[in-house]
Structures are given as C-alpha cells and as structure tokens.
Image (cartoon, rainbow, N blue to C red):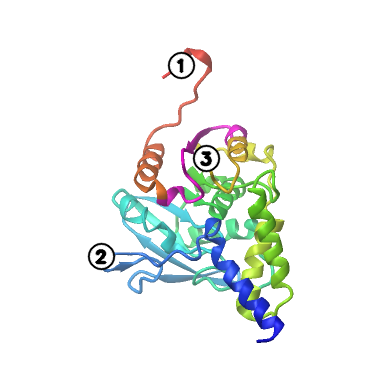
Amino acid sequence: MSVSKKLLLSVVTALLTLSAFAQSTLPVASTGNTEYGNNAKVGKYAKIRGFNMYYEVYGTGKPLLFIHGNGGSINNFKNQIPYFTKNYKVILADSRAQGKSTDPADSLTYEMMADDFNALLNQLHVDSCYVVGWSDGGIDGLLLAMRHPEKVKKLAITGANLWPDTTAVEPDLFQWIVSTNDSLAKVPQIPTVKAQKKLLSLMIFHPHISTADLKQVKCPTLVIGGDNDVILPKHTMAIAQAIPQSYLWILPNSGHSTLIGYKDMFNQVVGDFFKTPYRKIKGMGQLD
C-alpha cells in the first residue's frame, strides 16, 4: 500500500470518530414502516439557490422546522419526529452538501445554509415556524432568526457555537479537527475527501457571530447544552445571556447528543417551551 493510500485510510478512519461533534455516522432510523431520511413516500427535492435540497414533511398543525448538525441528515431526529408530529407539521431537510442534498460547490457557510432554509420555507409557503437546531443546525437557526426574523416564532438550539476557537469548542477536539483537515489536504482529492474537507473547514473557519449580534434574535429562544458538551458550557451560557428573550438549560451528565441521551425530557421541555408564552424573570420579586 502506498504512503498516500495509507494516509487516506487513516484519515477516513479518523473521520468516523467525529460523531461526538457531527451526526453523520448515526444509523438511518425507522419507526414502523417509516424510514426517516429515506422515505420514498414523502421525500421530495426543492430546487433552490443552485442546488436540490432534499426534504420530508410529517404531521399537521403549526409548522416546526428541524435543522441537523455537521455531516448529519434528517434521520438524526429519529427520537423527535414521532413525538412532535402529534401536534405539529414537522419539516426536515438535509442541509446543503449533506445527506441527499448534494452540492459540488467549493464554498460553504452557515449564512448560505440559513438562507437555504428561508428559501425552502418560502417554497413550502410557510410564513413563520418554530425551529429546533442541533449543533451546526443551532448556528443555522440563530442566523435564520437574525437574517429572516419573520420566519422564526420560537427557537430551540442545542450545542451551538458563535465562533470557531478553543474558547467555544473543547480544545482537544478542535485541534483534532484542524489536524484532520490538514491531513485531508495531503491525500488524493477524490469527491469523498473534498466533501469531508468542506465540512471540516466549515467548523474550523466559521461561524463569526458576536454576542452583540445576538441582540438581533427577537424571538424567544431556548438555549441548550450538556455539562460535558464539546461546546463549552460557559460559551452556551454566553449565548443565552446575549439573546434578549432566552431561557438556559444545561443538562447534567450529558455530552453533545442531548436529543439522544435525554430524548424524552428534551421533547417534553422543548414542546412545553413552544406552547408556553415567554416570561421574563425580573429580580428577586419572582422566585417561582
């Protein structure tokens, strides 16, 4: 085996361990006869902004958009879809250059993806909706609320970050992502490698959101993280403190996958947040 092939094999093997941060390695989930993310009965493509965006819609009621994380896809929300379709019209899509939404372009930013979701909502004739974003999906959700505020009624995000460095992301993981991305530059640039490098580069060089920028988020927002999340809890707290109408929920004994490890609690708390009017606690006068 040549040196380049050995390096390529080691890099691909290493990429499989990224599931702590990205959701690409989770198995396609099915409930009954429904295979989420690969459902021929409901799966469709929306031709928007220069690529074909794959999406699925379940249930009826007020629209609720789910946005997955880096390298993920629709099936990452296997624990949420059955619960929320009881009361909502659940909209899920594979983000640009991920899942079934192929995009050969070299560039990829969170702003692009936020505008993609706005375009999808326009095509589905959705004026506004509730939004749940996981990891990179949380970043997309924040930007959707900032760039297209009329589209987001309420926002729940888990494991999101505002900037790409070790003050936001667990240092060992961030350095590992950087070194893996550097290794990818040394192997033959086959389509699979180029696609992975684009997603890794996204996490290394983006996003660039300041806490001051978050004042543009006008909708009530539930900011969620694990106490052992790869997004440092102090960073998650800073996000919540900067958003004018926010709640903060840090789950104990939890990493990045709050939607999996605490699926039932997550669904109930987020569902209650969507149903209950936002209340601002003011001083010591309100202790309940």
Compared across the picture, whether 95 is left or right of 288 comes to right
**SS type, badge 1:** loop
The verdict on residue 241 being magenta is: yes
Q: Nearer the viewer, residue 266 or 123?
A: 266
Locate the C terminus by quadrant.
top left
Residue 4 placement (x, y as % from top left) = 70, 81
Left or right position of 53 against 203: left
**Considering only order in the chain, which callout, 1 or 3, is on the residue closer to the N terminus?**
3
Residue drawn at x 26%, y 68% is: 33
- Quarter-wise, where is residue 182 in the image? bottom right
Q: Tag 3, which secondary structure?
A: loop
Cα–Cα span, label 3 and label 2: 34 Å
Q: Residue 152 location, x and y as percent?
A: 50, 46
Percent position of residue 277, x then y: 41, 32
Between circles 3 and 2, the one closer to the viewer is: 3
Q: Quick one: label 1 or label 2, which is nearer the N terminus?
A: 2
Quarter location, residue 1: bottom right
Q: Earlier in the sequence, mark 3 or mark 2?
A: 2
Task: Find disc 3 in the rendering and name its residue.
Answer: 227
| Secondary element type, mark 2 | loop
Query: With 122 as the anchor, is 14 left or right in this view?
Result: right
The image quadrant of residue 92 is bottom left
Q: Looking at this view, name the residue that lies furthest to the front.
A: 1
Read off the residue under disc 2. Answer: 32
Depth check: give the residue in front, 256 or 40: 256
Question: What residue lies at 37% left-to-right and 53% top-to-bottom?
Answer: 80
Relative vertical location of residue 198 with respect to residue 83 in this rendering, above or below: below
Q: Which residues are magenta?
A: 240-260
Q: Which residue is mark 1?
A: 286
Evaluate whether residue 231 shows in this view: yes
Label 1, label 2: how far apart the Cα atoms are: 46 Å
Q: Residues within 10 Å of mark 1 (few under 14, many from 20)?
A: few
